[in-house]
Each structure stands twice: as C-alpha cells, then as structure tokens.
Amino acid sequence: MRAHNRVRLLRAVHDCGASLTRSRLTRDLGLARGTASVLVGELAEAGLLHEEPAAEHGRGRPTQVPGPHPYGPLALAVDVREDAWELAVCELGGRATVLEVRPHDGTPEGALVPLGAALRSRLDHLAPRVVGIGVALAGPVRPGGLVDIAHLRWNSVDVPGLLGLPEPPVVGNDTAFAGLAEARRGGLRGVAVGLHLHVDFDLGGVLIVDGRPLGGAAGIGAEFGHMPLTGGDAPCMGGARGCWGQGGGTNALLRHLGLAHGGGRGRDQAERLLAGAAAGDESAVRAVTACAGALGRGIAALVNAHDPEVVTLSGFGVDLHARALPALMERFGGGLMTIRRDRPPRLAPSALGWRGSLIGAMESVFDAFLTVEAVDRWRRTRS
C-alpha cells in the first residue's frame, strides 16, 4: 500500500505541474497528514521529490510545495517534424527545457542518425537520471517503432534501429502525442470525449476518451487526414483518394497559390502567407480562407461521427483559427447535423501551440516511469 501511495503522490505532483501544496495534495489523495509526511520524506530521500515554501502563505509555518528533485528523474522528448527535430529535457511536473533544434534533409538517415548521436550525447551527460526517451513522428507508427511518412517517402522506417540507443525509445505519432498532452495539460483536461487535430504539412487527428488517445487495434488508427471528408477525389501519396489533409494542411495552403509543396519543405513560406493574410493580402486571405473552410467541413463530419465535447486545434490550426475563424465556423456549422447545431462542441486553439507533440512524448515516458515497479527500481539504485 505504501508503494502504491508513493506512486499516487508522484503522479499527482506531476499532473498538477508541481503547483499544489502538500496539504492540498494530502486532501485530494485522501491521505492522513502523517502518512503524507512519511511518503514525502521517503521520496525526498530517494531523490524523487524536493519541497520548497509556497510563494504565499498565511501565519505559522510556511506551506510546502512538493516538486521535482534537483537530481531527480528526467525524460528526454523529441518532436521529429518533416523538416527539423526538437529535443528537450523534461522534469517531473512537466517543465520542458529545449536543448537543441536542428533542421534535416527529410531522409530517414539524415533525420534520425544525427538525432541518435545527439541523444546518446545527452544520455552520457545526464545518466543515470534519464528514465526514458519519447519520440514523436509525423506519420503512423506501427509496433516495433516502424514509421511510414508517405509525403517524405518513408516506408517501414526502423526508428529505434536508426537511432541506435542503448534502450528502445517510446515512439509515437505526433498527433496522438499532441492529443495526450492536450488531455493532460491543455483544453481537453477533464473532458470525457474530446477531439484533437494537429495541422502541419498535412492534417492529423485523434479521438481522446477519458484522457487517452484511441489508437485502434494495431495502434495506427485515427488517420482522419486520410478520410474523404471534403468531397475531393485527387490521389494522395498515402495511397487513398480525396484525403481531407489535401485541403487543410500547409501543403494545401501552398497549393492554393500555385507554390511548390511537398517533401517537408515550405514551412517558412507558409508562415509568411499566414502573416500576409493577417495584413490583408488578398491572395493570402483567399488561400487561408479555403484551408480554414476545408478544416471546418471535416471537423463537422468528425463531430457528427464521434460526438465530442470539445475540439482542440494545434500547429497551424491555431493560426487558421485566428486568421479565418468566420470561414472555419461557417463550414463547421453548415456541416453539422440539425440535432447538433443547438449545442455544438466548443472549438478551441491549443494553449500548447507547437509544443503539444513534444509534451506528449514526455508524458509517454513518465507514464512508463510512474509505476510501482519503476519507482521502486529507482529507489533501490539510490539506497
């Protein structure tokens, strides 16, 4: 029971962002004050927690706030986008510090071999504090860490093999990780059924039920961007036709203006187009409006199917929400069934922005660590 309560306390500190006092955590977890004091002492001795006085407190002894130990467990988290990767180190409680951002050439070797070298260097420096590595990738991930990114021509790429790490990382789809982050630290926290959509070069989504992304029987479900939700019939590099993502991602934005697209290139140009739309450039406004309309129509179809309480948008979805909200909402509302129009789900931009995939990769590592077995193993190595 004590081992179980140690993990419950660590999980509570992590989930609240190390922001709650010991007395509040004690109440929330239904613990006796004496029990909580013993648990905090054990976790501090094991290098898992450290307490600091609360910023504000009343009379008497200062209220203590449990947080990450200065020599406590760390997660390394990576977001591998089509044109660059971002590496961060994360503490218990969720604070992430970006260590390195590096562009790559879009090939598996050009992206993952240098990333593996960077991760091994960080492991050499931070060991034995690192409890795991989470890697988010912009494509469906099959068992064993095999990833397919059609528009980069990645087919069954062995991500763990190319990274060459001492222990296999947790490898996952970037949108699924972004949805997990949204459920833990964003707009889907406490939502029973939510829908999260991540817009980058293409468009991805995931259904969140009781705080967990639904991955399907083989872990590669929720490929919403490859559903024919907007009435097109053009072939997609993923093998399907009429894919929603062809109308709603960055590639679509560039395509609307007749600009070169594909291959994970054009992010800077897309950002300039979005800025141009904000400044009133007519051609940019038309392209952004078209993408927002396609996004809204597809969201309506998914809402009709899944009945979420809230829909959150990350990546360029935040920009489309900000720059072309009327077009997005018009197509969204027009696509809803009549029974849903009186009380449609709320559409909200993610407060996590582009960091959702990175934060979700971190959460996947701490999910594996915050178990009785893993915490006891940490404590034994430090006894």
Image: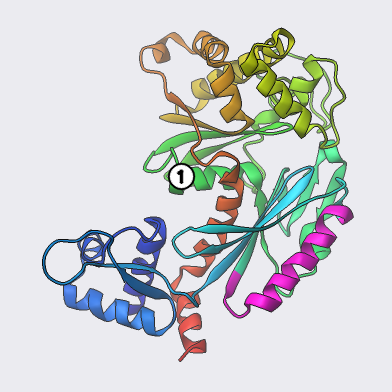
The residue under the point 60% across, 55% down is 361
Residue in front for this viewpoint, 129 or 364 = 129
Q: Is residue 338 visible?
A: yes
Label 1 environment density (alpha carbons within 10 Å; few <14, some 14–19, many ≥20): many
Please determine whether, in this image, residue 49 is positioned above or below residue 267: below
- Residue 191 is left or right of residue 222, and the answer is left
Query: Residue 204 magenta-drawn?
Result: no
Q: Is residue 4 left or right of residue 99?
A: left
Q: Is residue 322 left or right of residue 229?
A: left
Q: Quadrant of the C terminus?
A: bottom left
- Looking at the picture, does residue 340 appear above or below residue 150? above
Q: Nearer the viewer, residue 110 or 102?
A: 102
Residue 127 sits inside the magenta stretch: yes
The quarter of the rendered structure image containing the N terminus is bottom left
Q: Residue at x 78, y 15 (%)?
A: 256
Q: Position of residue 209 (x, y in %)?
A: 46, 41
The stretch in magenta equals 109-131
Residue tagged 1 = 183
Residue 51 position, x and y percent, is 33, 72
| Residue 248 placement: quadrant | top right
Residue at screen point 34% across, 83% down: 42
Q: Residue 319 appears in which quarter of the rendering?
A: top right
Q: Is 62 in front, or is 76?
A: 62
Q: Residue flagged by tag 1: what amino acid is it?
A: Ala
